[in-house]
Amino acid sequence: MSTPVTPEHDDHGSTPAAWTAVVIITIAFAVGTLAVVLGNWPMFWVGVGLVVVGAVVGKVMQAAGLGKKAPASPSATPDQ
């Protein structure tokens, strides 16, 4: 008999915390890119600030339990 194979992960990190961080940081890069094209340096720094906000929001949401859960320790099976 063979033992069943269980994947180490099944969600590829798709969590509310990850998606929120990705959306905020993507918007930040769009703002920064538009700022560079327009030559608007204050707008560029707003984009940089949004990158930081996105990272912080993602970490706070992860700490609140909306991020990826730590993998459960494998159950001990006796060797036969």
Image (spheres, grey):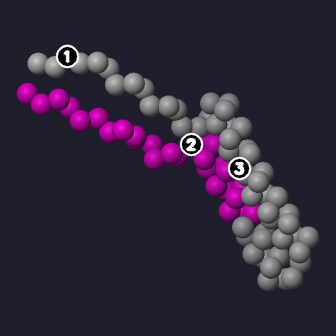
Q: Which residue is situated farthest in the left direction here?
A: 1
Rounded to the nearest whole Å, what is the CA distance between mark 1 and mark 2? 34 Å
**Circles 1 and 2: CB distance less than 8 Å?**
no
Quadrant where the C terminus sits is top left
Q: Is residue 66 above or below residue 76?
A: below
Q: Amino acid at mark 2?
A: Thr
Observer-nearest of 50 and 77: 77
Which stretch appears magenta?
A: 1-28
- The residue indicated by pointer 2 is 15
Which residue is drawn at the image coordinates 79% and 57% (left, top)? 50
- Between tags 1 and 2, which lies in front? 1
Quadrant where the N terminus sits is top left
Q: Amino acid at mark 3?
A: Ala
- The residue indicated by pointer 3 is 55
Q: Is residue 7 above or below residue 40?
A: above
**How many neighbours does mark 2 have within 10 angstroms: few (below 14), some (14-19), or many (20 or more)?**
some
SS for tag 1?
A: loop
Which residue is drawn at the image coordinates 63% and 43% (left, top)? 17
- The residue indicated by pointer 1 is 78
Q: Is residue 53 above or below residue 75?
A: below
Q: Locate residue 47: give its quadrant.
A: bottom right
Rounded to the nearest whole Å, what is the CA distance between mark 3 and mark 1? 43 Å
Q: Residue 49: give x, y in percent of width and height.
A: 82, 58
SS for tag 3?
A: helix
